[in-house]
Image (cartoon, grey):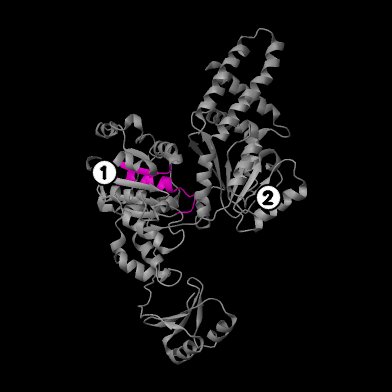
Amino acid sequence: MTRQITTYENYYRIAFSYSPMIVSAVKEIPGRRFDPVSKSWIVPLVSKGAVEAFAKRFGFQWGTMQRAEEVGEIPPLPELGIDIPLGIDLFPYQKQGVAYCLEHPRTIIGDKPGLGKTAQAIASVIGAQRYPCLIICPATLKINWQREVDKFSGGKCRAMILSDKNMRTWPQYWSAGLVQFFIVNYESLKKYFVDKFTNKEGQRLMLSHIKFKENLTDLFKSVIIDESHRCKNGSTQQSKFCMGIARGKDMVLLLTGTPVVNKPKDLIPQLHIMDMLPEFGGYKHFVNRYCAGDKEASNLRELNYKLNLNCFYQREKQDVLKDLPSKMRQTIICDITNRKEYTDAYDNLIRYLKEYRNADDDKIRKAMRGEVIVRINVLRQIAARGKVASVREFIDDLRESNEKLILFMNLIELGDAFKQLYPNAVVIRGGMSDIEKQRSVDKFQNDPDCLLAICNIKAAGVGLTLTASSRVAFVEFPWTYADCEQCEDRAHRIGQKDSVTCYYFLGKDTIDEQVYKIIQTKKDIAQTITGSTEQIEESVVDDIINLFTNH
Protein backbone atom coordinates (compact mmCIF):
# COMPACT_ATOMS: atom_id res chain seq x y z
CA MET A 1 0.00 0.00 0.00
CA THR A 2 1.25 3.49 -0.88
CA ARG A 3 1.96 5.70 2.13
CA GLN A 4 -0.67 8.36 1.69
CA ILE A 5 -2.32 11.19 3.62
CA THR A 6 -5.68 12.48 2.38
CA THR A 7 -7.10 15.78 3.60
CA TYR A 8 -10.82 16.05 4.34
CA GLU A 9 -12.85 19.02 5.54
CA ASN A 10 -12.42 18.10 9.21
CA TYR A 11 -9.61 15.56 9.42
CA TYR A 12 -6.65 13.79 7.82
CA ARG A 13 -6.74 10.11 6.84
CA ILE A 14 -3.36 8.34 7.06
CA ALA A 15 -3.03 5.00 5.23
CA PHE A 16 -0.02 2.69 4.97
CA SER A 17 1.07 -0.94 5.00
CA TYR A 18 1.71 -2.25 8.47
CA SER A 19 5.02 -1.22 10.00
CA PRO A 20 5.69 -1.28 13.76
CA MET A 21 7.86 1.82 13.47
CA ILE A 22 5.21 3.85 11.60
CA VAL A 23 2.43 2.64 13.93
CA SER A 24 4.49 3.74 16.91
CA ALA A 25 5.07 7.14 15.31
CA VAL A 26 1.43 7.73 14.32
CA LYS A 27 0.36 7.00 17.88
CA GLU A 28 2.37 10.05 18.97
CA ILE A 29 0.18 12.39 16.87
CA PRO A 30 -2.35 14.18 19.12
CA GLY A 31 -6.01 13.21 18.67
CA ARG A 32 -5.35 10.27 16.36
CA ARG A 33 -7.68 7.24 16.26
CA PHE A 34 -7.72 4.03 14.24
CA ASP A 35 -10.59 3.38 11.79
CA PRO A 36 -11.08 -0.44 11.55
CA VAL A 37 -13.33 -0.18 8.49
CA SER A 38 -10.79 1.48 6.19
CA LYS A 39 -7.80 0.23 8.24
CA SER A 40 -6.39 3.75 8.37
CA TRP A 41 -5.74 6.45 10.98
CA ILE A 42 -7.94 9.53 11.47
CA VAL A 43 -6.31 12.73 12.77
CA PRO A 44 -8.01 16.12 13.45
CA LEU A 45 -6.90 19.15 11.39
CA VAL A 46 -5.62 20.88 14.53
CA SER A 47 -2.72 18.41 14.50
CA LYS A 48 -1.52 19.75 11.13
CA GLY A 49 2.05 20.42 12.28
CA ALA A 50 2.51 16.93 13.71
CA VAL A 51 1.03 15.35 10.57
CA GLU A 52 3.33 17.34 8.25
CA ALA A 53 6.38 16.34 10.29
CA PHE A 54 5.21 12.71 10.29
CA ALA A 55 4.70 12.79 6.50
CA LYS A 56 8.16 14.22 5.87
CA ARG A 57 9.82 11.70 8.18
CA PHE A 58 8.33 8.62 6.49
CA GLY A 59 7.92 9.87 2.92
CA PHE A 60 4.11 10.00 2.74
CA GLN A 61 2.34 11.32 -0.36
CA TRP A 62 -0.40 13.92 0.02
CA GLY A 63 -3.70 13.07 -1.67
CA THR A 64 -6.16 15.54 -3.15
CA MET A 65 -8.62 17.38 -0.94
CA GLN A 66 -11.74 15.32 -0.17
CA ARG A 67 -14.99 16.40 1.43
CA ALA A 68 -15.92 14.66 4.66
CA GLU A 69 -18.07 11.55 4.65
CA GLU A 70 -21.81 12.18 4.83
CA VAL A 71 -22.91 9.72 7.46
CA GLY A 72 -26.07 9.82 9.53
CA GLU A 73 -28.19 7.42 11.49
CA ILE A 74 -29.75 4.72 9.32
CA PRO A 75 -33.52 4.81 9.94
CA PRO A 76 -35.31 1.59 10.92
CA LEU A 77 -37.19 -0.25 8.19
CA PRO A 78 -40.82 0.85 7.81
CA GLU A 79 -43.80 -1.16 8.98
CA LEU A 80 -46.12 -2.71 6.40
CA GLY A 81 -49.35 -0.70 6.38
CA ILE A 82 -51.38 -2.74 3.89
CA ASP A 83 -52.73 -6.28 3.80
CA ILE A 84 -51.23 -8.35 0.99
CA PRO A 85 -53.19 -11.51 0.09
CA LEU A 86 -50.59 -14.26 0.53
CA GLY A 87 -50.79 -18.00 1.00
CA ILE A 88 -48.33 -17.98 3.92
CA ASP A 89 -47.86 -15.43 6.69
CA LEU A 90 -44.60 -13.52 6.55
CA PHE A 91 -42.39 -13.06 9.60
CA PRO A 92 -42.47 -9.52 11.06
CA TYR A 93 -38.99 -8.67 9.71
CA GLN A 94 -40.04 -9.90 6.24
CA LYS A 95 -43.07 -7.57 6.33
CA GLN A 96 -40.69 -4.69 7.06
CA GLY A 97 -38.61 -5.71 4.05
CA VAL A 98 -41.70 -5.73 1.85
CA ALA A 99 -42.68 -2.29 3.18
CA TYR A 100 -39.22 -0.98 2.23
CA CYS A 101 -39.53 -2.43 -1.29
CA LEU A 102 -42.94 -0.81 -1.76
CA GLU A 103 -41.46 2.54 -0.72
CA HIS A 104 -38.26 1.93 -2.74
CA PRO A 105 -39.30 -0.18 -5.75
CA ARG A 106 -35.70 -0.36 -7.01
CA THR A 107 -33.94 -2.19 -4.21
CA ILE A 108 -31.27 -4.73 -3.40
CA ILE A 109 -32.76 -7.21 -0.91
CA GLY A 110 -29.52 -8.11 0.86
CA ASP A 111 -30.69 -10.35 3.70
CA LYS A 112 -28.31 -13.19 4.49
CA PRO A 113 -29.18 -16.72 3.23
CA GLY A 114 -32.09 -18.40 4.95
CA LEU A 115 -34.04 -15.24 5.81
CA GLY A 116 -36.50 -15.42 2.92
CA LYS A 117 -35.43 -12.99 0.19
CA THR A 118 -37.58 -14.94 -2.28
CA ALA A 119 -40.72 -14.54 -0.17
CA GLN A 120 -40.13 -10.80 0.27
CA ALA A 121 -39.61 -10.25 -3.46
CA ILE A 122 -42.74 -12.18 -4.45
CA ALA A 123 -44.84 -10.44 -1.78
CA SER A 124 -43.54 -7.03 -2.93
CA VAL A 125 -44.57 -7.62 -6.53
CA ILE A 126 -47.98 -8.90 -5.41
CA GLY A 127 -48.39 -5.94 -3.05
CA ALA A 128 -47.46 -3.47 -5.80
CA GLN A 129 -49.52 -5.39 -8.41
CA ARG A 130 -46.69 -4.99 -10.92
CA TYR A 131 -47.55 -7.76 -13.39
CA PRO A 132 -46.27 -9.40 -15.41
CA CYS A 133 -43.02 -9.98 -13.57
CA LEU A 134 -39.87 -11.52 -15.03
CA ILE A 135 -37.71 -13.54 -12.64
CA ILE A 136 -34.07 -14.00 -13.70
CA CYS A 137 -32.28 -16.66 -11.66
CA PRO A 138 -29.66 -19.44 -11.79
CA ALA A 139 -30.82 -22.44 -13.83
CA THR A 140 -30.88 -24.71 -10.78
CA LEU A 141 -33.41 -22.47 -8.99
CA LYS A 142 -36.05 -22.10 -11.72
CA ILE A 143 -38.28 -24.88 -10.42
CA ASN A 144 -37.90 -23.65 -6.86
CA TRP A 145 -39.00 -20.12 -7.88
CA GLN A 146 -42.02 -21.56 -9.69
CA ARG A 147 -43.14 -23.42 -6.58
CA GLU A 148 -42.44 -20.45 -4.30
CA VAL A 149 -44.70 -18.20 -6.39
CA ASP A 150 -47.52 -20.72 -6.07
CA LYS A 151 -46.91 -21.16 -2.33
CA PHE A 152 -46.60 -17.52 -1.31
CA SER A 153 -49.43 -16.31 -3.54
CA GLY A 154 -51.71 -19.01 -2.20
CA GLY A 155 -52.25 -20.26 -5.74
CA LYS A 156 -53.62 -16.89 -6.88
CA CYS A 157 -50.58 -16.27 -9.12
CA ARG A 158 -48.98 -18.64 -11.57
CA ALA A 159 -45.40 -18.83 -12.74
CA MET A 160 -44.17 -20.22 -16.05
CA ILE A 161 -40.61 -21.33 -16.81
CA LEU A 162 -39.59 -20.20 -20.28
CA SER A 163 -38.57 -23.14 -22.45
CA ASP A 164 -38.32 -24.15 -26.07
CA LYS A 165 -41.89 -25.50 -25.86
CA ASN A 166 -43.40 -22.12 -25.02
CA MET A 167 -40.80 -19.88 -26.68
CA ARG A 168 -43.31 -18.37 -29.12
CA THR A 169 -46.48 -18.63 -27.08
CA TRP A 170 -45.61 -17.53 -23.52
CA PRO A 171 -46.84 -13.89 -23.95
CA GLN A 172 -50.30 -15.26 -24.75
CA TYR A 173 -50.51 -16.81 -21.29
CA TRP A 174 -50.19 -13.31 -19.81
CA SER A 175 -52.72 -11.88 -22.24
CA ALA A 176 -55.18 -14.61 -21.25
CA GLY A 177 -54.64 -13.88 -17.54
CA LEU A 178 -53.25 -17.36 -16.88
CA VAL A 179 -49.69 -16.46 -15.76
CA GLN A 180 -48.32 -13.47 -13.83
CA PHE A 181 -44.66 -14.48 -13.30
CA PHE A 182 -42.25 -15.72 -15.97
CA ILE A 183 -38.95 -17.39 -15.04
CA VAL A 184 -35.74 -17.54 -17.06
CA ASN A 185 -32.15 -18.42 -16.23
CA TYR A 186 -29.24 -16.08 -16.94
CA GLU A 187 -27.85 -18.23 -19.75
CA SER A 188 -31.13 -18.10 -21.70
CA LEU A 189 -31.66 -14.31 -21.70
CA LYS A 190 -30.14 -13.94 -25.16
CA LYS A 191 -32.34 -16.68 -26.62
CA TYR A 192 -35.62 -15.18 -25.41
CA PHE A 193 -35.04 -11.44 -25.32
CA VAL A 194 -32.22 -10.38 -27.67
CA ASP A 195 -32.93 -9.72 -31.34
CA LYS A 196 -29.40 -9.00 -32.56
CA PHE A 197 -26.05 -7.29 -31.90
CA THR A 198 -25.12 -4.23 -33.96
CA ASN A 199 -21.43 -3.92 -33.02
CA LYS A 200 -18.93 -4.46 -35.80
CA GLU A 201 -16.53 -7.40 -35.84
CA GLY A 202 -13.81 -6.87 -33.26
CA GLN A 203 -15.69 -3.99 -31.64
CA ARG A 204 -16.33 -4.24 -27.91
CA LEU A 205 -19.97 -5.01 -27.15
CA MET A 206 -21.76 -2.10 -25.50
CA LEU A 207 -25.30 -1.98 -24.14
CA SER A 208 -26.21 0.33 -27.04
CA HIS A 209 -25.20 -2.45 -29.47
CA ILE A 210 -27.83 -4.85 -28.11
CA LYS A 211 -31.18 -4.72 -29.88
CA PHE A 212 -33.79 -6.29 -27.62
CA LYS A 213 -37.09 -7.79 -28.68
CA GLU A 214 -38.98 -4.71 -27.57
CA ASN A 215 -42.45 -6.20 -27.83
CA LEU A 216 -41.31 -8.78 -25.24
CA THR A 217 -39.06 -6.79 -22.89
CA ASP A 218 -41.53 -3.87 -22.78
CA LEU A 219 -44.24 -6.28 -21.66
CA PHE A 220 -42.92 -6.58 -18.10
CA LYS A 221 -43.82 -4.19 -15.30
CA SER A 222 -41.34 -5.65 -12.81
CA VAL A 223 -38.13 -7.67 -12.77
CA ILE A 224 -36.64 -9.81 -10.00
CA ILE A 225 -32.97 -10.76 -10.39
CA ASP A 226 -31.83 -13.54 -8.03
CA GLU A 227 -28.16 -13.87 -7.04
CA SER A 228 -27.53 -10.44 -8.58
CA HIS A 229 -23.86 -10.47 -7.59
CA ARG A 230 -23.45 -12.53 -10.76
CA CYS A 231 -23.79 -9.19 -12.52
CA LYS A 232 -20.90 -7.56 -10.63
CA ASN A 233 -18.84 -7.43 -13.83
CA GLY A 234 -20.57 -4.92 -16.09
CA SER A 235 -18.63 -6.03 -19.16
CA THR A 236 -20.26 -9.47 -19.36
CA GLN A 237 -23.15 -10.15 -21.71
CA GLN A 238 -25.49 -11.32 -18.95
CA SER A 239 -24.96 -8.07 -17.00
CA LYS A 240 -25.75 -6.04 -20.11
CA PHE A 241 -28.81 -8.17 -20.84
CA CYS A 242 -30.10 -7.55 -17.32
CA MET A 243 -29.49 -3.80 -17.70
CA GLY A 244 -31.44 -3.66 -20.95
CA ILE A 245 -34.33 -5.85 -19.78
CA ALA A 246 -34.75 -3.97 -16.47
CA ARG A 247 -34.63 -0.53 -18.10
CA GLY A 248 -37.77 1.53 -17.45
CA LYS A 249 -39.53 -1.07 -15.28
CA ASP A 250 -41.77 0.06 -12.41
CA MET A 251 -40.15 -2.32 -9.93
CA VAL A 252 -36.66 -3.87 -10.05
CA LEU A 253 -35.63 -6.08 -7.13
CA LEU A 254 -32.15 -7.57 -6.86
CA LEU A 255 -31.59 -10.45 -4.45
CA THR A 256 -28.14 -11.20 -3.02
CA GLY A 257 -26.58 -11.65 0.39
CA THR A 258 -23.24 -10.51 -1.07
CA PRO A 259 -23.78 -7.45 -3.28
CA VAL A 260 -20.10 -6.58 -2.80
CA VAL A 261 -17.95 -9.65 -3.38
CA ASN A 262 -14.57 -7.94 -3.66
CA LYS A 263 -14.75 -4.14 -4.00
CA PRO A 264 -17.32 -1.31 -4.15
CA LYS A 265 -17.04 -1.45 -7.97
CA ASP A 266 -19.10 -4.65 -7.78
CA LEU A 267 -22.09 -2.44 -7.00
CA ILE A 268 -21.89 -0.30 -10.13
CA PRO A 269 -23.54 -2.75 -12.59
CA GLN A 270 -26.20 -3.65 -10.01
CA LEU A 271 -27.00 0.03 -9.41
CA HIS A 272 -27.08 0.49 -13.19
CA ILE A 273 -29.59 -2.35 -13.55
CA MET A 274 -31.87 -0.58 -11.06
CA ASP A 275 -31.21 2.83 -12.66
CA MET A 276 -30.04 4.03 -9.26
CA LEU A 277 -26.49 5.09 -10.19
CA PRO A 278 -27.58 8.77 -10.59
CA GLU A 279 -28.50 8.77 -6.87
CA PHE A 280 -24.78 8.23 -6.21
CA GLY A 281 -23.57 10.96 -8.55
CA GLY A 282 -23.20 8.82 -11.66
CA TYR A 283 -20.44 6.43 -12.69
CA LYS A 284 -17.49 8.82 -12.56
CA HIS A 285 -18.42 10.28 -9.18
CA PHE A 286 -19.06 6.80 -7.73
CA VAL A 287 -15.62 5.61 -8.82
CA ASN A 288 -13.83 8.73 -7.54
CA ARG A 289 -15.73 8.82 -4.26
CA TYR A 290 -16.03 5.17 -3.28
CA CYS A 291 -13.34 3.32 -5.26
CA ALA A 292 -10.24 5.41 -4.48
CA GLY A 293 -6.92 4.31 -3.04
CA ASP A 294 -4.84 1.18 -3.41
CA LYS A 295 -7.67 -0.98 -2.15
CA GLU A 296 -10.17 0.71 -4.50
CA ALA A 297 -12.38 1.31 -1.48
CA SER A 298 -13.07 4.68 0.14
CA ASN A 299 -15.77 6.49 2.13
CA LEU A 300 -17.37 3.15 2.93
CA ARG A 301 -19.50 4.42 5.81
CA GLU A 302 -21.02 7.04 3.55
CA LEU A 303 -21.67 4.45 0.83
CA ASN A 304 -23.41 2.17 3.33
CA TYR A 305 -25.49 5.06 4.63
CA LYS A 306 -26.61 6.16 1.15
CA LEU A 307 -27.38 2.60 0.06
CA ASN A 308 -29.65 2.06 3.07
CA LEU A 309 -31.41 5.37 2.47
CA ASN A 310 -32.08 4.71 -1.20
CA CYS A 311 -32.05 1.12 -2.36
CA PHE A 312 -30.69 -1.50 0.02
CA TYR A 313 -31.32 -3.32 3.27
CA GLN A 314 -29.68 -6.31 4.90
CA ARG A 315 -30.28 -8.32 8.05
CA GLU A 316 -28.13 -11.01 9.63
CA LYS A 317 -29.77 -14.02 11.29
CA GLN A 318 -28.87 -12.73 14.73
CA ASP A 319 -30.72 -9.48 13.93
CA VAL A 320 -34.06 -11.28 13.56
CA LEU A 321 -33.73 -14.34 15.79
CA LYS A 322 -36.77 -13.30 17.83
CA ASP A 323 -38.92 -13.75 14.69
CA LEU A 324 -37.42 -17.05 13.52
CA PRO A 325 -38.22 -20.61 14.56
CA SER A 326 -35.20 -22.49 15.94
CA LYS A 327 -35.16 -24.75 12.87
CA MET A 328 -36.45 -24.28 9.32
CA ARG A 329 -36.61 -26.72 6.41
CA GLN A 330 -36.54 -25.90 2.73
CA THR A 331 -36.79 -28.21 -0.28
CA ILE A 332 -34.86 -27.32 -3.42
CA ILE A 333 -36.21 -29.05 -6.52
CA CYS A 334 -33.54 -29.48 -9.18
CA ASP A 335 -33.21 -31.13 -12.57
CA ILE A 336 -30.92 -34.15 -12.58
CA THR A 337 -28.15 -34.37 -15.18
CA ASN A 338 -28.42 -38.15 -15.77
CA ARG A 339 -32.09 -38.41 -16.76
CA LYS A 340 -31.63 -41.32 -19.22
CA GLU A 341 -29.79 -43.43 -16.64
CA TYR A 342 -32.53 -42.69 -14.13
CA THR A 343 -35.34 -43.50 -16.57
CA ASP A 344 -33.73 -46.83 -17.49
CA ALA A 345 -33.40 -47.79 -13.81
CA TYR A 346 -36.97 -46.64 -13.12
CA ASP A 347 -38.35 -48.77 -15.96
CA ASN A 348 -36.32 -51.71 -14.67
CA LEU A 349 -37.80 -51.27 -11.20
CA ILE A 350 -41.36 -51.09 -12.55
CA ARG A 351 -40.88 -54.32 -14.50
CA TYR A 352 -39.54 -56.10 -11.42
CA LEU A 353 -42.38 -54.78 -9.23
CA LYS A 354 -44.88 -56.30 -11.64
CA GLU A 355 -43.23 -59.67 -11.03
CA TYR A 356 -43.23 -59.00 -7.29
CA ARG A 357 -46.91 -58.07 -7.28
CA ASN A 358 -47.89 -61.16 -9.30
CA ALA A 359 -45.88 -63.64 -7.19
CA ASP A 360 -48.26 -66.14 -5.57
CA ASP A 361 -46.17 -67.68 -2.83
CA ASP A 362 -45.49 -65.53 0.27
CA LYS A 363 -42.00 -66.99 0.53
CA ILE A 364 -41.22 -65.94 -3.02
CA ARG A 365 -42.57 -62.45 -2.35
CA LYS A 366 -40.47 -62.17 0.80
CA ALA A 367 -37.35 -63.25 -1.07
CA MET A 368 -38.07 -60.81 -3.88
CA ARG A 369 -38.71 -57.96 -1.44
CA GLY A 370 -35.01 -57.66 -0.62
CA GLU A 371 -34.23 -57.20 -4.31
CA VAL A 372 -36.97 -54.55 -4.56
CA ILE A 373 -35.37 -52.56 -1.75
CA VAL A 374 -31.97 -52.83 -3.44
CA ARG A 375 -33.36 -51.54 -6.72
CA ILE A 376 -35.16 -48.65 -4.98
CA ASN A 377 -31.88 -47.68 -3.32
CA VAL A 378 -30.11 -47.83 -6.70
CA LEU A 379 -32.74 -45.44 -8.05
CA ARG A 380 -32.13 -43.02 -5.16
CA GLN A 381 -28.37 -43.20 -5.72
CA ILE A 382 -28.72 -42.42 -9.42
CA ALA A 383 -30.88 -39.40 -8.52
CA ALA A 384 -28.24 -38.28 -6.01
CA ARG A 385 -25.45 -38.40 -8.60
CA GLY A 386 -27.58 -36.29 -10.93
CA LYS A 387 -27.87 -33.48 -8.35
CA VAL A 388 -24.14 -32.72 -8.00
CA ALA A 389 -24.16 -29.75 -10.40
CA SER A 390 -27.10 -28.10 -8.63
CA VAL A 391 -25.62 -28.66 -5.17
CA ARG A 392 -22.29 -27.28 -6.34
CA GLU A 393 -23.94 -24.08 -7.55
CA PHE A 394 -25.69 -23.74 -4.19
CA ILE A 395 -22.43 -24.25 -2.27
CA ASP A 396 -20.58 -21.71 -4.41
CA ASP A 397 -23.22 -19.05 -3.77
CA LEU A 398 -23.11 -19.77 -0.04
CA ARG A 399 -19.31 -19.61 0.03
CA GLU A 400 -19.39 -16.11 -1.44
CA SER A 401 -21.13 -15.09 1.78
CA ASN A 402 -18.38 -16.89 3.73
CA GLU A 403 -21.07 -19.21 5.18
CA LYS A 404 -20.27 -22.68 6.51
CA LEU A 405 -22.31 -25.72 5.43
CA ILE A 406 -22.75 -29.31 6.61
CA LEU A 407 -23.44 -31.56 3.61
CA PHE A 408 -24.92 -35.04 4.12
CA MET A 409 -24.91 -38.00 1.73
CA ASN A 410 -24.48 -41.79 1.71
CA LEU A 411 -22.48 -42.58 -1.41
CA ILE A 412 -18.70 -42.56 -0.93
CA GLU A 413 -18.22 -41.57 -4.57
CA LEU A 414 -20.33 -38.45 -3.97
CA GLY A 415 -18.21 -37.51 -0.97
CA ASP A 416 -15.08 -38.00 -3.07
CA ALA A 417 -16.53 -35.83 -5.85
CA PHE A 418 -17.29 -32.94 -3.48
CA LYS A 419 -13.91 -33.28 -1.76
CA GLN A 420 -12.25 -32.93 -5.17
CA LEU A 421 -14.33 -29.83 -5.87
CA TYR A 422 -13.58 -28.33 -2.42
CA PRO A 423 -10.14 -29.52 -1.27
CA ASN A 424 -10.25 -27.49 1.96
CA ALA A 425 -13.44 -29.27 3.11
CA VAL A 426 -13.31 -31.79 5.93
CA VAL A 427 -14.68 -35.30 5.50
CA ILE A 428 -16.44 -37.41 8.16
CA ARG A 429 -17.21 -40.93 6.94
CA GLY A 430 -17.19 -44.58 7.93
CA GLY A 431 -13.81 -46.24 8.42
CA MET A 432 -12.33 -43.20 10.15
CA SER A 433 -11.09 -43.55 13.71
CA ASP A 434 -12.61 -41.46 16.48
CA ILE A 435 -9.42 -39.37 16.53
CA GLU A 436 -9.67 -38.69 12.79
CA LYS A 437 -13.33 -37.72 13.07
CA GLN A 438 -12.59 -35.36 15.94
CA ARG A 439 -9.77 -33.79 13.98
CA SER A 440 -12.23 -33.05 11.16
CA VAL A 441 -14.78 -31.67 13.63
CA ASP A 442 -12.19 -29.41 15.29
CA LYS A 443 -11.04 -28.00 11.95
CA PHE A 444 -14.60 -27.26 10.84
CA GLN A 445 -15.46 -25.69 14.20
CA ASN A 446 -12.33 -23.56 14.55
CA ASP A 447 -10.87 -22.84 11.09
CA PRO A 448 -12.64 -19.84 9.48
CA ASP A 449 -11.36 -20.91 6.05
CA CYS A 450 -12.92 -24.38 6.32
CA LEU A 451 -16.44 -23.75 5.03
CA LEU A 452 -17.66 -27.25 4.17
CA ALA A 453 -18.08 -30.50 6.12
CA ILE A 454 -18.78 -33.51 3.86
CA CYS A 455 -20.58 -36.03 6.04
CA ASN A 456 -21.69 -39.62 5.64
CA ILE A 457 -25.17 -40.02 7.12
CA LYS A 458 -24.35 -43.09 9.20
CA ALA A 459 -20.90 -41.94 10.33
CA ALA A 460 -21.75 -38.32 11.17
CA GLY A 461 -25.50 -38.42 11.77
CA VAL A 462 -25.23 -38.80 15.54
CA GLY A 463 -23.01 -37.65 18.37
CA LEU A 464 -20.99 -34.94 16.65
CA THR A 465 -21.19 -31.21 17.33
CA LEU A 466 -20.89 -29.00 14.24
CA THR A 467 -22.40 -25.78 15.55
CA ALA A 468 -19.97 -23.59 13.57
CA SER A 469 -22.62 -23.84 10.85
CA SER A 470 -26.31 -23.03 11.01
CA ARG A 471 -26.92 -24.65 7.61
CA VAL A 472 -27.39 -28.32 6.84
CA ALA A 473 -27.96 -29.71 3.34
CA PHE A 474 -28.85 -33.18 2.09
CA VAL A 475 -27.81 -34.54 -1.30
CA GLU A 476 -29.18 -37.86 -0.06
CA PHE A 477 -31.34 -38.19 3.04
CA PRO A 478 -32.28 -41.05 5.41
CA TRP A 479 -35.41 -43.20 5.16
CA THR A 480 -36.94 -41.86 8.38
CA TYR A 481 -37.84 -38.50 9.86
CA ALA A 482 -36.05 -39.40 13.10
CA ASP A 483 -32.79 -40.05 11.24
CA CYS A 484 -33.18 -36.81 9.27
CA GLU A 485 -33.55 -34.97 12.57
CA GLN A 486 -30.45 -36.63 13.96
CA CYS A 487 -28.42 -35.26 11.04
CA GLU A 488 -30.01 -31.82 11.34
CA ASP A 489 -29.15 -31.77 15.03
CA ARG A 490 -25.42 -31.83 14.35
CA ALA A 491 -25.94 -28.05 13.99
CA HIS A 492 -29.16 -27.66 15.99
CA ARG A 493 -27.80 -28.35 19.47
CA ILE A 494 -26.33 -26.65 22.52
CA GLY A 495 -23.80 -24.07 21.39
CA GLN A 496 -25.77 -22.99 18.32
CA LYS A 497 -26.49 -19.26 18.40
CA ASP A 498 -28.52 -19.02 15.18
CA SER A 499 -31.68 -20.46 13.75
CA VAL A 500 -30.77 -23.57 11.75
CA THR A 501 -31.85 -23.90 8.11
CA CYS A 502 -32.00 -27.39 6.57
CA TYR A 503 -32.01 -27.78 2.78
CA TYR A 504 -33.24 -30.96 1.08
CA PHE A 505 -32.22 -31.30 -2.58
CA LEU A 506 -34.90 -33.28 -4.39
CA GLY A 507 -34.48 -34.41 -7.98
CA LYS A 508 -37.42 -33.22 -10.08
CA ASP A 509 -39.71 -36.09 -11.14
CA THR A 510 -37.63 -38.62 -9.20
CA ILE A 511 -38.15 -40.95 -6.26
CA ASP A 512 -36.76 -38.18 -4.02
CA GLU A 513 -40.04 -36.31 -4.05
CA GLN A 514 -42.10 -39.37 -3.10
CA VAL A 515 -39.72 -40.48 -0.34
CA TYR A 516 -39.54 -37.01 1.18
CA LYS A 517 -43.32 -36.66 1.16
CA ILE A 518 -43.84 -40.05 2.79
CA ILE A 519 -41.20 -39.33 5.45
CA GLN A 520 -42.89 -36.05 6.34
CA THR A 521 -46.28 -37.72 6.69
CA LYS A 522 -44.78 -40.23 9.11
CA LYS A 523 -42.84 -37.76 11.25
CA ASP A 524 -45.42 -37.84 14.06
CA ILE A 525 -45.04 -41.61 14.27
CA ALA A 526 -41.26 -41.45 14.18
CA GLN A 527 -41.19 -38.88 16.96
CA THR A 528 -43.03 -41.25 19.32
CA ILE A 529 -40.69 -44.19 18.85
CA THR A 530 -37.80 -44.85 21.20
CA GLY A 531 -34.82 -46.98 20.38
CA SER A 532 -34.61 -48.54 16.91
CA THR A 533 -36.45 -46.91 14.00
CA GLU A 534 -36.36 -50.05 11.83
CA GLN A 535 -40.14 -50.46 12.14
CA ILE A 536 -40.70 -47.03 10.65
CA GLU A 537 -38.14 -47.65 7.91
CA GLU A 538 -39.93 -50.85 6.96
CA SER A 539 -43.19 -48.89 6.81
CA VAL A 540 -41.67 -46.25 4.52
CA VAL A 541 -40.28 -48.91 2.20
CA ASP A 542 -43.69 -50.58 2.09
CA ASP A 543 -45.30 -47.28 1.14
CA ILE A 544 -42.76 -46.77 -1.65
CA ILE A 545 -43.35 -50.29 -2.97
CA ASN A 546 -47.11 -49.74 -2.86
CA LEU A 547 -46.75 -46.38 -4.58
CA PHE A 548 -44.77 -47.83 -7.47
CA THR A 549 -46.85 -50.99 -7.65
CA ASN A 550 -50.07 -49.01 -7.90
CA HIS A 551 -48.47 -46.79 -10.52
Give the extent of the magenta segment. Answer: 111-138
Q: Position of residue 3 (x, y in %)?
A: 48, 79
Please determine whether, in this image, residue 209 is positioned above or below residue 276. above
* Lower position in the chain sequence, tag 2 or tag 1: 1
Residue placed most toward the observer, 95 or 25: 25
Give the farthest residue toward the left: 215
**Residue 300 drawn above or below residue 89:** below
Q: Residue at x 38, y 59 (%)?
A: 267
Label 2, residues with CA under 10 Å away: few <14, some 14-19, many ≥20: many
Indicate which label's residue lies in the foreground, 2 or 1: 1
Give the residue drawn at x 38%, y 34%. 155
Q: Quadrant of residue 446?
A: bottom right
Q: Residue under label 1, please give it.
A: 196
Q: In terms of depth relative to the viewer, which is nearer, 156 or 405? A: 405
Q: Amino acid at mark 1?
A: Lys
Return the residue found at the far front: 201
User: In the rendering, at what x and y percent does residue 375 appear?
Assistant: 62, 23
Residue 324 visible to an observer of this rendering: no
- Which residue is labeled 2 in the image? 465
Q: Is residue 386 visible?
A: yes
Answer with left or right where residue 497 lies relative to residue 299: right
Q: Is residue 378 above or below residue 286?
A: above
- Residue type indicated by callout 2: Thr
Q: Viewer-proximal residue, 533 or 346?
A: 346
Q: Position of residue 147 (x, y in %)?
A: 43, 36
Q: CA distance from mark 2 to mark 1?
A: 55 Å
Q: Secondary structure at mark 1?
A: strand
Q: What kind of element bears circle 2?
A: loop
Examine the structure image and report whether residue 130 is included in the region drawn in magenta: yes
Q: Is residue 81 magenta?
A: no
Q: Is residue 466 left or right of residue 326?
A: right
